[in-house]
Image (cartoon, rainbow, N blue to C red):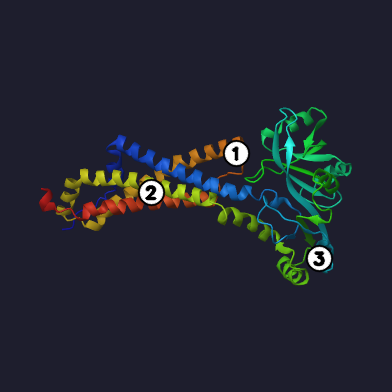
């Protein structure tokens, strides 16, 4: 006669074993939650770094981007002849271009008088630059020399510029040692490479940085007909333009910047290693809990084996314990991660947000962590001999 299985009798054996010692369960959940939070933060910082590095790149109104092949990243841009944009206009699918100067200049905080590096973009006010439809109206104020638009999302170290403008105050300061007036605000956002941004005309830009050749630009934005294939046009321009310019699609331009931070710096590796360490710490904690649980209940498991229960059934109990631990540990880790992401955004203004892909990845890692630990703990049960235990 076959024994009644506890599955058919609806006995939640895995749950009962876990909750039999509440303190041990809380310790296990705390360890899993800590490991989950660590993975959330490390992966969040890593992905936030990559996303923040292309904050401005995503806002450009362009289908193609021309840049110098000597440019390494947004923090190390080289110039190329502006006339390459004129040559690009010869293609039948090109409908417009925008020459852009790109460099870091010293901004003087008008309140504390301290200086800080700021990313300055110079463009022709009559040309489209960003996808923001309001910029064309704001850019009209840049036709006067010495006028700039300040990024209201810049870090506070640049001064209370948005607050002063909202009160109707005239805001003047120095950029690269020359007097400028802030005539409006834009919303771009800081990045790992730049804590703040400003927009100005090319005339003002060249006045602030006279060493920059007038015929040289760092970025060339190219707009195509709506029915054009950007990759095909890019290929055609690569063949027709000289080798002193690189032609990228908008997405390739974004990936170019991300790849610099991903492959040319150690930051991405450090954050990935931190997430791996959180995974390892969680594995050790869960393994210790499950191994101790199996060891403490060996007589009960041995009794069930002697009664005729298959080892496969008992191993399933340990596996379910691992799944329960993963679910119960993940939930507080997820909400804690949300809170910490919000704190990081408010403190650093970096785009660190919880997305579905990262939430799923961390859950899978926690599940693998718990199931792997359960698998190792099962060896204690497999090696158990009812005769030796009794």
- Residue drawn where x is 39% and y is 53% of the image: 368
Q: Nearer the viewer, residue 294 or 38?
A: 38
Q: Quadrant of the N terminus?
A: bottom left
- Judged from the image, the secondary structure of the residue bearing numbered disc 1 is helix
Asked which quadrant contains residue 183, the reply is: top right
| Lower position in the chain sequence, tag 2 or tag 1 | 2
- Residue drawn where x is 45% and y is 42% of the image: 331
- Judged from the image, the secondary structure of the residue bearing numbered disc 3 is helix
Label number found at residue 88: 3
**From the viewer's perspective, is the residue at label 3 or at label 2 nearer?**
3
Q: Nearer the viewer, residue 315 or 49?
A: 49
Label number found at residue 280: 2
Spot occupied by residue 337 in the image (x, y as percentages of width and height): 50, 41
| Lower position in the chain sequence, tag 3 or tag 2 | 3
Q: CA distance from mark 2 to mark 1?
A: 28 Å
Outermost residue toward the front in this view: 211
Q: Tell whether 287 sits left or right of 139.
A: left
């Amino acid at each position: 006669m076959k024994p009644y299985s506890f599955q058919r009798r609806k006995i939640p054996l895995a749950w009962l074993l876990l909750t039999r010692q509440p303190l041990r369960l809380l310790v296990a959940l705390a360890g899993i939650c800590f490991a989950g939070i660590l993975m959330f933060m490390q992966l969040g910082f890593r992905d936030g770094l990559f996303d923040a590095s292309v904050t401005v790149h995503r806002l450009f109104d362009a289908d193609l981007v021309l840049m110098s092949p000597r440019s390494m990243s947004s923090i190390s841009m080289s110039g190329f002849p502006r006339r390459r944009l004129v040559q690009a206009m010869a293609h039948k699918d090109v409908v417009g271009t925008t020459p852009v100067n790109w460099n870091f200049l010293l901004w003087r905080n008008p309140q504390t008088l301290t200086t800080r590096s700021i990313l300055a973009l110079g463009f022709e006010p009559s040309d489209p630059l960003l996808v923001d439809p309001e910029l064309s109206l704001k850019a009209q104020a840049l036709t006067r020399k010495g006028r700039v638009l300040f990024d209201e999302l810049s870090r506070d170290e640049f001064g209370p510029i948005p607050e002063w403008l909202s009160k109707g105050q005239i805001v003047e300061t120095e950029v690269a040692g020359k007097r400028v007036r802030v005539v409006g605000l834009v919303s771009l956002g800081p990045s790992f490479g730049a804590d703040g941004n400003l927009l100005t005309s090319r005339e003002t830009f060249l006045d602030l940085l006279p060493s920059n050749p007038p015929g040289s630009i760092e970025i060339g934005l190219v707009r195509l007909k709506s029915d054009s294939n950007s990759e095909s046009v890019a290929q055609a321009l690569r063949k027709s333009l000289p080798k002193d310019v690189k032609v990228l699609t908008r997405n390739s331009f974004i990936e170019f910047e991300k790849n610099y931070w991903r492959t040319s710096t150690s930051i991405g590796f450090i954050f990935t290693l931190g997430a791996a360490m959180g995974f390892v710490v969680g594995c050790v904690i869960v393994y210790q809990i499950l191994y101790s649980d199996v060891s403490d209940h060996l007589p009960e498991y041995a009794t069930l084996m002697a009664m005729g229960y298959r080892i496969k059934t008992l191993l399933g109990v340990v596996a379910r314990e691992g799944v329960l631990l993963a679910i119960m540990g993940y939930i507080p880790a997820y909400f804690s991660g949300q809170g910490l992401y919000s704190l990081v955004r408010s403190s650093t203004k970096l785009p660190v947000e919880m997305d579905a892909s990262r939430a799923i990845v961390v859950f899978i890692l926690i599940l693998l962590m718990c199931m792997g630990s359960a698998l190792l703990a099962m060896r204690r049960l497999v090696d158990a001999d009812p005769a030796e235990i009794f």
